[in-house]
Image: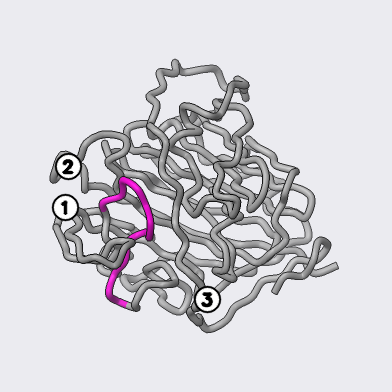
């Protein structure tokens, strides 16, 4: 439940599906290719317009604002973050307790914590992202593989029949995996931390993100991380409010495909701060949500970055070691 601007709340519940309409994403803008030379270990921000480049393909993964108009994007375009899996001594914030803790031992996914499709999908039947332009994957539970201490969301080139956003049967060239806490855990305010490794790939599009728990609207949306597989040292972080200005940051990091990295997000009543390997990289203070949200991770396959070349385009794994949510006691 939403505890208001000065309260933090987390809710564990048996999942119930809403009769509200399915989220639908906005059309993607064109993908830009960036040639960035390695920089020294420092935070370097270059302020540019967000209407092109990363602002194009890191558009909201959910629906356009209720006005039907694309919100303006602002913010720095690139910021450099050094290599290494660094843990800040200030994270999680002082006074926090663990509200959600998911690690991946054994060989089976904990389905009490994780659903394997969007909330509006028929359980076990698979799904795709309704209304999405340029995505070619069909999500299936079988593509969520727990092994070697990690959850692996696996994309494979194996055509399968599914249903598109218009309800019309369609053959999808790729199978892939996703997980969500929509039916088990939502929260208002807190520190979210994910340890993961992304795949390289011409068409892979992994993401870690959050959406409203009530399903009545597709925004606000908070993107902890999303990245195109050809540019694994250029992840993006973003905030897409229900009303107002979208804010995004493109990062220049060490390759996120080369090892485990930790992305964190501290969501407070007055601000949202993103962290990469313990380093704060982006802050939003306008339009901060005060409603319960839930977490998603998925490995999409998009032909917006480049034409599909099967089977290589449908090959890759987003591996996740842990997902944690920490919260402070209500004031």
| Magenta-tinted stretch | 124-136
Mark 3 nearby-residue class (10 Å; few <14, some 14–19, many ≥20): some
Asked if residue 271 is among those painted magenta in the image, a careful observer would answer no
**Magenta stretch secondary structure, dominant:** loop
- Circle 1 sits on which residue? 157
Measured as percent of width and height from the top left, residue 282 is found at 65, 37
Measured as percent of width and height from the top left, residue 119 is found at 44, 71
- Separation of residues labelled 1 and 2 (CA atoms): 8 Å
With 249 as the anchor, is 153 left or right in this view? Answer: left
Q: Nearer the viewer, residue 256 or 177?
A: 177
> Residue 147, can we see it?
no
Q: Residue at x 41, y 67 (%)?
A: 118
Q: Residue at x 62, y 23 (%)?
A: 45
- Separation of residues labelled 1 and 3 (CA atoms): 31 Å
**Label 2 SS:** helix
Mark 1 nearby-residue class (10 Å; few <14, some 14–19, many ≥20): some
**Residues tagged 1 and 2 counted as in contact (Cβ below 8 A):** yes
- Circle 2 sits on which residue? 312
């Amino acid at each position: 439940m939403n505890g208001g601007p000065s309260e933090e709340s987390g809710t564990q519940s048996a999942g119930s599906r809403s009769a509200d309409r399915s989220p639908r994403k906005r059309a993607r803008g064109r993908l830009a290719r960036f040639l960035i030379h390695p920089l020294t270990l420092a935070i370097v921000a270059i302020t540019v317009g967000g209407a092109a480049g990363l602002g194009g393909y890191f558009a909201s993964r959910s629906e356009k604002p209720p006005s039907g108009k694309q919100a303006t994007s602002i913010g720095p375009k690139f910021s450099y973050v050094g290599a290494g899996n660094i843990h800040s001594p200030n994270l999680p914030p002082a006074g926090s307790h663990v509200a959600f803790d998911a690690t991946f031992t054994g060989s089976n996914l904990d389905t009490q914590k994780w659903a394997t499709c969007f909330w509006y999908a028929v359980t076990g039947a698979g799904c795709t992202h309704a209304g999405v332009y340029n995505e070619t994957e069909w999500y299936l539970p079988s593509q969520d593989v727990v092994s070697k201490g990690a959850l692996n969301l696996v994309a494979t080139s194996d055509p399968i029949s599914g249903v598109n956003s218009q309800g019309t049967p369609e053959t999808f060239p790729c199978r892939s995996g996703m997980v969500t806490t929509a039916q088990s855990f939502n929260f208002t305010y807190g520190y979210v931390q994910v340890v993961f490794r992304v795949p390289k790939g011409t068409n892979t599009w992994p993401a870690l993100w959050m959406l409203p728990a009530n399903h009545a609207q597709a925004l606000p949306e908070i993107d902890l991380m999303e990245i195109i597989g050809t540019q694994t040292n250029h992840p993006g972080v973003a905030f897409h409010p229900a009303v107002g200005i979208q804010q995004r940051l493109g990062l220049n990091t060490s390759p996120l495909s080369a090892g485990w990295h930790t992305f964190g997000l501290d969501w407070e009543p007055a601000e949202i701060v993103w962290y990469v390997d313990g380093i704060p990289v982006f802050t939003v203070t306008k339009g901060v949500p005060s409603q319960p949200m839930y977490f998603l991770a998925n490995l999409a396959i998009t032909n917006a970055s480049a034409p599909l070349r099967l089977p290589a385009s449908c090959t890759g794994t987003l591996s996740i070691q842990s997902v944690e949510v920490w919260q402070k006691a209500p004031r």
